[in-house]
Image (cartoon, rainbow, N blue to C red):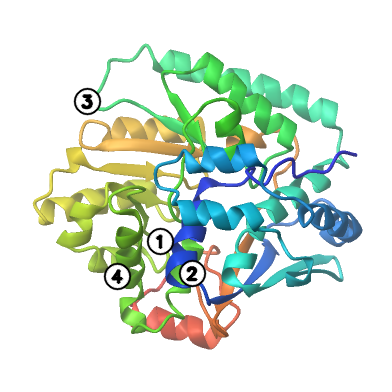
């Protein structure tokens, strides 16, 4: 079988943007990442151990090509010294381990954060593709093509509706939980060809380059979480993370993630300064309608015209859900929709709900306090309880 990782560019754009910010501002930080499957697979993931080991061996042999580095240099927010760093970067196999723990697969990456943070996305789609190789691929892709065609028709029917103040735009966010690399390639090329009026980019940098699409992404939870362990008061970690981002990107990549310790706690820190500097907010947990209304009310309280801002939705979206959210908000603010698993792994087989999260930084626990029950993650219950108390967060 061909190796699963085809290019080091084949990862989410926000890996590069967070990577650059942390390299410049916290180059000595140490991180620990742990893999977790949140749902019940159809067979034990521990059976994949040897295959995962082999794929990681291959990953650690790869380098960025000159053409890939040139592409990254062409993105205006990528700085020349970071591109230079990537020309010599290679993943170190000693920083990542794979173990079978009964039926469970334990994958842990530990080391300098600028050397281990990149493992996450590759690990997730390696496990996904290996897992689904044991199913009937022809049947899965055949049904997936039918479902994709239905999605295209849903968008075409939607195109007949009266136009609203702001256009509908959606993106592919499906690299991490895709059925396979070949299927994601087909999905992205199909959407770019059939729905150019709506489909505006992909988080997969390799495919963005291949199909001349806009690479999409800014920050993820790990970036904000790391600041829980940096030398700032814990109550101020979100402000410190946002301030570092502003100083690094000077107006670029202006979509802030809101759910590291919950939307209410985020808005308490998202004052007039940040609300003016950031272009918008990204939703990734909790009720999206409630979240959006809170965001618009916050802008109104700050006397900021929400029509100049953007709300990006990315939590377990389907096409009908994205369209419903658009209809609700489109006349009051700009919107965007990142659709992941429902684009790249909508087959007859149950998708894996897998993550690989930062659990410790600088030998201290860090946590995500989600607005969706079950999505919070921390390996230290004492720290989790303390964080919840500091930010008055009640969702587990």
Q: Which residue is mark 1?
A: 259
In the rendered structure, find residue 368 and report the number of the disc placed on it. Answer: 2
Sequence-earlier tag: 2 or 3: 3
Sequence-earlier tag: 2 or 1: 1
Q: Is residue 12 visible?
A: yes
Q: Are marks 2 and 1 in contact (CB under 8 Å)?
A: yes
Residue 152, percent from left and from top: 54, 18
Q: Which residue is mark 4?
A: 239
Q: Are marks 1 and 4 in contact (CB under 8 Å)?
A: no
In the rendered structure, find residue 165 and report the number of the disc placed on it. Answer: 3
- Residue drawn 41% across the image and 44% down it: 313
Residue 371, percent from left and from top: 42, 62
291 relative position to 331: left or right: right
Q: Secondary structure at mark 3?
A: loop
Q: Is residue 370 visible?
A: no
Residue 179, above or below 355: above
In depth, the one of 323 and 190 nearer the eye is: 190
When asked about the image quadrant of residue 76, the answer is: top left
- Residue drawn 74% across the image and 40% down it: 6
Q: Are marks 3 and 1 in contact (CB under 8 Å)?
A: no
Q: Secondary structure at mark 2?
A: loop
């Amino acid at each position: 079988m061909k190796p699963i990782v085809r290019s080091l560019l084949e990862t989410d754009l926000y890996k590069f943007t967070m990577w650059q910010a942390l390299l410049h501002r916290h180059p000595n930080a140490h991180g620990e990442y742990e893999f977790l499957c949140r749902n019940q697979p159809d067979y034990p993931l521990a059976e994949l151990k040897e295959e995962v080991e082999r794929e990681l061996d291959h990953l650690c042999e790869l380098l960025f090509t000159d053409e890939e580095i040139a592409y990254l240099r062409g993105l205006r927010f990528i700085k020349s010294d970071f591109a230079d760093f990537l020309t010599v970067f290679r993943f170190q196999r000693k920083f990542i381990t794979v173990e079978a723990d009964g039926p469970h697969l334990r994958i842990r990456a530990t080391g300098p954060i600028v050397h281990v943070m990149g493992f996450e996305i590759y690990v997730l789609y390696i496990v996904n593709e290996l897992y689904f190789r044991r199913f009937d691929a022809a049947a899965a892709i055949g049904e997936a093509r039918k479902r994709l065609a239905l999605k295209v028709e849903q968008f075409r029917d939607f195109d007949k509706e009266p136009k609203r103040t702001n256009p509908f735009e959606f993106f592919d966010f499906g690299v991490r939980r895709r059925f396979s690399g070949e299927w994601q390639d087909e999905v992205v090329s199909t959407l770019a060809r059939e729905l150019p009026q709506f489909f505006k980019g992909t988080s997969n940098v390799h495919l963005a380059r291949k199909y001349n699409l806009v690479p999409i992404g800014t920050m993820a939870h790990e970036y904000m979480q790391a600041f829980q362990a940096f030398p700032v008061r814990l109550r101020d970690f979100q402000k410190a993370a946002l301030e570092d981002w502003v100083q690094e990107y000077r107006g670029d990549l202006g979509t802030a993630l809101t759910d590291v310790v919950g939307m209410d706690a985020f808005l308490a820190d998202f004052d007039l300064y940040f609300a003016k500097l950031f272009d918008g907010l990204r939703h990734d947990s909790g009720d999206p309608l409630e979240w959006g209304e809170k965001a618009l009310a916050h802008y109104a309280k700050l006397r900021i015209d929400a029509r100049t801002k953007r709300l990006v939705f990315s939590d377990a979206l389907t096409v009908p859900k994205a369209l419903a959210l658009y209809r609700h908000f489109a006349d009051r603010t700009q919107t965007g929709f990142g659709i992941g698993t429902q684009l790249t792994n909508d087959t007859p087989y149950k998708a894996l709900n897998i993550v690989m999260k930062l659990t410790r930084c600088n030998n201290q626990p860090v946590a995500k306090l989600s607005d969706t029950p079950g999505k919070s993650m921390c390996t230290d219950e004492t720290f989790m309880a303390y964080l919840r108390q500091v930010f008055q967060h009640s969702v587990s």
